[in-house]
Image (tube, grey):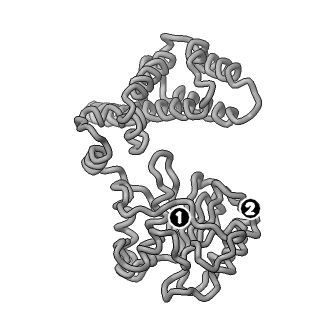
Amino acid sequence: MGVALHTRPHDNPTQYRSQTKNTMNNTYPWHSATLKHIESQLHDNRQPHATLFRLRADYDDEQLGWEIAKRLLCDQQTGCNACKHCRLMNENAHTNALFLDVINDKVGIDQVRELEQQMWQTALFDKPKVAYIQGMDLLSLGAQNALLKTLEEPPENAFFVLSVSNISRVLPTIMSRVQRLHHAKVDQDSLYHWLQKQLNNPVTEAAIARTAKLVDDAPLRTLALLKMPELGQKLQQEKAQFADFISKKISASTLTSSLDKDEPQAQLQRYCRYTESLIHVLFQKSISDNSELGNKRADNRQGNSVQYATWNGVSLRALYRLHDSLTDLRRLADSNVNLTLQFTTSLTEWQHER
């Protein structure tokens, strides 16, 4: 069955398995603000019955779901790691916590209905029942509708924690019945302190900042690069080559020659991130430039017209088109098409039209 209940001595091993994700005694610093928000709601007795958040790559946001569940069961409502319920959660042994892993398991409407039945059963402990559905957006339409019925009329003293990768795949009717959590921006000082603790050798903040910039501040990816400096150098070269392609210093075929044959999706994802970063910079510069231009024209009593910044002659519109092309190529990476040919053709067309 697809519902994973924390393992008990009398459980049938063919029916249940323990959760695959171990809860940790220490939370990540980039989850702290979200968890403080949950703790505040619990303290004020205003925690909604269903909470949803988006999974980000290289942030281990799957862990956030378990930390939320732990606080819903904790005697102190803080994930204290000292009470009986926190210890059971840390040992994957709390019978009030249910887990559906849609990302790694085959989960359909039957498993969702089974989860609903278990949520209505009497709990062994005098605590809420908590269901954590990881990758809920990957459920079929029928399975989402089955979940919707439970969210519309939830059992008393029951909570649902839902994580998704793509909000657009979630039924609007489900979105209207959940609290959506928004990830706070990573505090740089906390991130630097955490990274320093993970490394055997001290690293300067400047080195951390340079490395983090390569991966858009994704903390776990930053840590991996700091532990493998040669990989960081490789990514710097990759980013510089991609910039040369955008500014027409090299051709699309030259860029194609460096395409990672083993992990093309990961490389295309990095190209998307590089493009997004450049779009953000140009967009902010356009806002600043137009603000100054608007002030000058106001002084001269002239009409306003929006002007957008460019980078090496490349416009924002062209960068958006490039991002769309890269996104389409990422989708093709898992198919049987000749990705190298598609990559060269698509990016050559972009260079000619930019």
Q: Position of residue 30 (x, y in %)?
A: 36, 54
The answer to whether residue 110 is above or below residue 236 is below
Front-lying residue, 91 or 45: 91
- Circle 2 residue: 141
Rounded to the nearest angstrom, the CA distance separating label 2 from label 1 is 18 Å
Mark 2 neighbour class, 10 Å CA radius: few under 14, some 14 to 19, many 20 or more = some
Q: Residue at x 57, y 57 (%)?
A: 164
Front-lying residue, 15 or 165: 15
> Disc number at residue 52?
1
Residue type, mark 1 in image = Leu
The answer to whether residue 238 is above or below residue 182 is above
Q: Position of residue 33 (x, y in %)?
A: 34, 61
Q: Residue at x 57, y 31 (%)?
A: 268
Residue type, mark 2 in image = Leu
Q: Quadrant of residue 331?
A: top right
Q: Residue at x 37, y 56 (%)?
A: 28
Q: Earlier in the sequence, mark 2 or mark 1?
A: 1
Mark 1 neighbour class, 10 Å CA radius: few under 14, some 14 to 19, many 20 or more = many
Question: Left or right of 178: which side holds 303?
Answer: left
Question: Left or right of 237: which side holds 36?
Answer: left
Asked whether residue 301 appears in the rendered view, the answer is no
The answer to whether residue 235 is above or below residue 201 is above
